Amino acid sequence: MKVPNDCLYTKNHEWLKKTDDGYLMGITDHAQEQLGEIVYLELPENGDTLSAGDALGVIESTKAVSDIYAPVSGTVAERNEELLEDDSNLQKINESPYSEGWLLKFTDVDESELDDLMDADAYEDSIAE
């Protein structure tokens, strides 16, 4: 299981990574392993404003249906449209959750909320419990 050091993590198994023009987010490698094969994804629209902890979408696998939560407050600047265009692209969440399987890009992020997220070591400790 991969837990990259350049991401921050939530207790609900979402990750957040700073980029040059915002923050990418997705579900963690641990989450996709627990879910199994992803078969459906629902995400908010570009321009939607979310608050930290808001349910922002749904991810469904052959095993379970789970809500996805906003790791921070911000505006949805971009959705990974490739995942939504064709169900066969959803496998990218399983195969590459931290790169090709990203879900959303946020802008206008309340950076004070970053302190509420876990670094890689803390996240690894939380899933080991």
Image (spheres, rainbow, N blue to C red):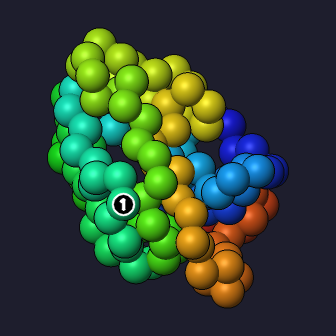
Residue 84: x, y in percent? 28, 29
Foreground residue, 69 or 29? 69
- Residue 113, compared with residue 71, is above or below; it is below
- Residue 119, compared with residue 88, is above or below; it is below
Element marked by disc 1: loop
Q: Note whether residue 37 is visible.
A: no
Residue under the point 22% across and 44% down = 42
Give, as a three-letter code, the residue at label 1. Answer: Gly
- Residue 78, compared with residue 74, is above or below; it is above
Q: As drawn, which residue projects farthest toward the top?
A: 88
In the picture of the structure, the residue carrying the numbered disc 1 is 47
Q: As drawn, which residue projects farthest toward the bottom?
A: 112
Residue under the point 48% across and 76% down = 73
Foreground residue, 68 or 80? 80
Left or right: 36 in relation to 97: left
Residue 112: x, y in percent? 67, 86
Which image quarter is the N terminus in? top right
Residue under the point 70% across and 45% down = 3
Left or right: 61 in relation to 81: left
Residue 12: x, y in percent? 44, 64
- Crowd band around label 1 with a 10 angstrom C-alpha radius: few (<14), some (14–19), many (20+): some
